[in-house]
Image (spheres, rainbow, N blue to C red):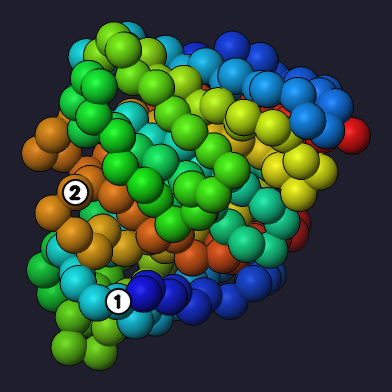
Amino acid sequence: GQSLEQPSEVTAVEGAIVQINCTYQTSGFYGLSWYQQHDGGAPTFLSYNALDGLEETGRFSSFLSRSDSYGYLLLQELQMKDSASYFCAVRGSGYSTLTFGKGTMLLVSP
Amino acid sequence: DVKVTQSSRYLVKRTGEKVFLECVQDMDHENMFWYRQDPGLGLRLIYFSYDVKMKEKGDIPEGYSVSREKKERFSLILESASTNQTSMYLCASSSVGTEEQYFGPGTRLTVT
């Protein structure tokens, strides 16, 4: 089976930096993805890491350590619109299926 | 622009009814997925399909079936709806060789 752990809620202020951690236990591992979901909206893809290291896309970065079964999403220069739920997801097989974590609700305050 | 559409945004059905949820994508994607999303549980995969007429069980297939007769359309069927199937149902699609899944807006199903 597969399981992912991430914090249920994180709070931060505008302009700050926040890190959302994700640890996973899987029988197979191809890569770790991150999705953002605003309240009432559909999940949208943010990033994918297949190899160790940091991937940067604008204000968002994602990190993976395969040896530690650990990754994180780093959000910089936080804006109010970043208030949303963030899900990590593991691709554990040759199929393109994902196992999602339970999500982290990020609350950004002024 | 990439688009995944779902037949209904909200649906109310009675226990025991047969329920069809339809999903259509216009991106010529090979892979299609059905998830349910419940508070505190994240997204859980029900079924997926990697080609027309092909289907594979996900993590929670019990009580559901699927149909994919055309590449762009993936249907989720609840043969006999039960109250524990009240949930948000999300459809997604992706292209072979890419990691990004594109999600539809979801159908909030209530079974009474």
Q: Quadrant of the C terminus of chain B?
A: top right
Q: Chain of mark 2?
A: A
Image coordinates for residue B60, horizontal then vertical, percent: 50, 54
Image coordinates for residue A95, horizontal then vertical, percent: 19, 49
Q: Nearer the viewer, residue A55 or B93?
A: B93
Q: Residue beneath label 2, please?
A: A95
For residue B82, what is the image quadrant?
Answer: top right
Q: Chain of mark 1?
A: A
The answer to the question of whether label 2 and label 1 lie on touching residues, with beta carbons closer than 8 A, is: no
Q: Is residue A102 left or right of residue B13?
A: left
* Residue B111 visible within the image: yes
Q: CA distance from mark 2 to mark 1?
A: 15 Å
Q: Residue beneath label 1, please?
A: A26
Give neighbour class at mark 2: few <14, some 14-19, many 20+ (Cα, 10 Å): some
* Residue B2 visible within the image: no
Residue at 24 percent across and 77 percent down: it is A27
Q: Nearer the viewer, residue B92 or A10?
A: B92
For residue B106, what is the image quadrant?
Answer: top right
Relative vertical location of residue A73 with respect to residue B18 in this rendering, above or below: below
Q: Secondary structure at mark 1?
A: loop
Q: Secondary structure at mark 2?
A: loop
* Amino acid type, label 2: Tyr
Q: Is residue B6 left or right of residue A67?
A: right
